[in-house]
Amino acid sequence: MKSFDVIVIGAGAAGLFSAITAGQRGKKVLVLEHAKKVGRKILMSGGGRCNFTNTYTEPSNFLSANPHFCKSALSQYTQWDFIDLVSRHSIPYHEKTLGQLFCDNSSKDIVALLLKECEKYAVAIQCRESILELEQLANCFSIKTSVSQYQSGAVIVATGGLSIPSMGPHGFGYKIAKQFNLSQEPCSAALVPFVMDADWKKLYTDLSGNSLPIIAETDEASFDEAMLFTHKGLSGPAILQISSYWKKNSNVSINLLPKHRVTEELLELKQKKPDVFLKSWLAEHFTKRLVNIMCEHWFRNRRLNEFSDRDIEVIGDHLNRFQIKPETTEGYKTAEVTLGGVSTNELSSKTMMANSVPGLYFVGEVVDVTGHLGGYNFQWAWSSGWVAGQNV
Ligand SMILES: Cc1cc2nc3c(=O)[nH]c(=O)nc-3n(C[C@H](O)[C@H](O)[C@H](O)COP(=O)(O)OP(=O)(O)OC[C@H]3O[C@@H](n4cnc5c(N)ncnc54)[C@H](O)[C@@H]3O)c2cc1C
C-alpha cells in the first residue's frame, strides 16, 4: 500500500492549492482526481480568461450561515498574495471592472501556474482515479480507489459543489461529511439566471439579448450592475448576484433607472414642459423596444400634464422599484456555484480541519462559504486551500 503525508481529493483550484502549500512545507502529497484532467472549472471560468481574484475581496463578499467563518482564511492568504504569485509567474492580467482580475490570454495560464508549482514541490497528481472508500484508522486514513489503495496522515476534501452536472459525478465531499456525521447547510444553485413564467416570456421575449444598468435588490442585498433579458427570463451580473440571495416565491426589486429619482424628475418636468409625452422621456433612457413595451403594457403614453401627480408617483415607483417574481432559476446546469455545503460549525476557521475528525480537512466550494460574482470564489479556493495546506 502506498503511503503519503497528505492525500487531496479533487484537483480543482482549492485542491491543487492546498497540495502546493503542503508540498512547499516538505509534505509528501498525492492529489486524486476522477476526471481525465485537472482544473476543468478553472479552464471554463471567466469566459476562458479566469477571473482569478478580486482586489476588493473582503468577508462581506461571501455568503455563509456563519458570515464570520471566512475571515481567518481570507486574512491568512489574501488576494495580494495570489496576485503576487501570478506576477512571479509572469502571467499577464488586467482589471476588467470592480476589482475583477482576468488573465489577458487564457485560463490555461492559471492551470499552468498550478501545475508548475506542483512540479516544483513534487506533488503527485493522479487523474482518472475514483475514490471508492475512505476509512479512518487508528492514526491515519485508508483510501481505496478504482486503481489502488493508499494510506495518509491527513485527507483534504476539495471536491467542489454541484454546478455543471455534465462534469459530474458530484457530491462525494458531502457524502464524506455524512459518513463522519458532519452537519451540512442545504445546497442550492447560486450565481444563476432566473427563469420567468409564461406570461413574462410572452411579453419580454423580444427583448432577449438587451442589457441595461440596474440595481437588483432583496431585503438582504443589493447589486448595481447590468441586467440581461434572455429567452427564459433574466440574467447578467446583477441578476446572477441577487440570485444567491433570492428565495423561492419571493420578489426581487429592480431599479430600472438607478441614477434617476423618476417621480421627482417627472414632476419637475411636468411643471417646466407640460406638453412633453411620457414616451419621449422614456426614449431618452431605454431602447426603443423596451419603451414600446412600457407604453403598450405599463403606462399610457400621454402628455405629462395629462397625468395627475399620483399617476406620476405610480410611474416613478414602477421604474425605480419594478417588482419581479422569478418562477425558478436555471439550476445547477448553468449555476456558477453551489450555496450551502459542509457546515462551518464543524470546521476550524483557522485550519479548515473538522473539529471532530483530526486530520480531515474540507476546502473550497464544498464548504458552506459562497462568494459573490467577480473572482471571489477562486479567492476562497486559494485562501481556504492555503490554510489547510499550512496545517496538515
Ligand atoms: C462556468 C463557470 C465559470 C466560473 N467563473 C469563475 C470566475 O471567473 N471566477 C471565480 O472566482 N469563480 C468562478 N466560478 C466558480 C469557481 O469555478 C468555483 O468556485 C471553483 O472552481 C471552486 O473550486 P474547488 O476547487 O472548490 O472546486 P472545483 O473547481 O469544482 O474542483 C473540484 C474537483 O474535484 C473533483 N472531484 C469531485 N469529486 C471527486 C471524487 N469523488 N474523486 C476525485 N475527484 C473528485 C472534480 O472533478 C474537480 O476537479 C465559475 C464557475 C463556473 C461553473
Image (cartoon, rainbow, N blue to C red):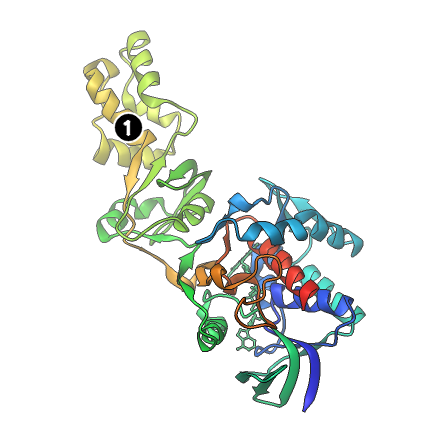
Helix, strand, or loop for circle 1? helix
Q: Position of residue 359 (x, y in %)?
A: 61, 73
Q: Position of residue 107 (x, y in %)?
A: 65, 59
Instruction: Please indicate, yes or no, whether residue 220 appears anywhere in the rendered image.
Output: yes
Give the crowd class for mark 1: few <14, some 14-19, many >=20 residues within 10 Å: some
Query: Which residue ends up furthest to the top in the rendered image?
Result: 272
Q: Position of residue 338 (x, y in %)?
A: 45, 60
Q: State whether residue 245 is above or below residue 341.
A: above
162 or 240, which is in the foreground?
162
**Lateral position of residue 108 relative to residue 268, left or right:** right
Q: State whether residue 240 is above or below residue 222.
A: below
194 or 153, which is in the foreground?
153
Quadrant holding the C terminus: bottom right
Residue at x-position 69% and y-position 51%: 104
Quadrant holding the N terminus: bottom right
Q: Is mark 1 within 8 Å of ligand 1?
A: no
Ligand 1 visible in quadrant: bottom right
Residue at x-position 41% and y-position 43%: 210
Residue at x-position 30% and y-position 45%: 204
Q: State whether residue 214 is above or below residue 136.
A: above
Residue at x-position 68% and y-position 60%: 110
123 or 65, which is in the foreground?
65
Q: Position of residue 336 (x, y in %)?
A: 48, 58
Mark 1 residue type:
Asp
Instruction: Please indicate, yes or no, whether residue 91 appears anywhere in the rendered image.
Output: no
Quadrant of the rendered image containing residue 95: top right
In the rendered image, which residue does mark 1 sit on? 317
**Lateral position of residue 263 relative to residue 148, left or right:** left
**Lateral position of residue 365 relative to residue 107, left or right:** left
Quadrant of the rendered image containing residue 385: bottom right
**Lateral position of residue 23 relative to residue 158, left or right:** right
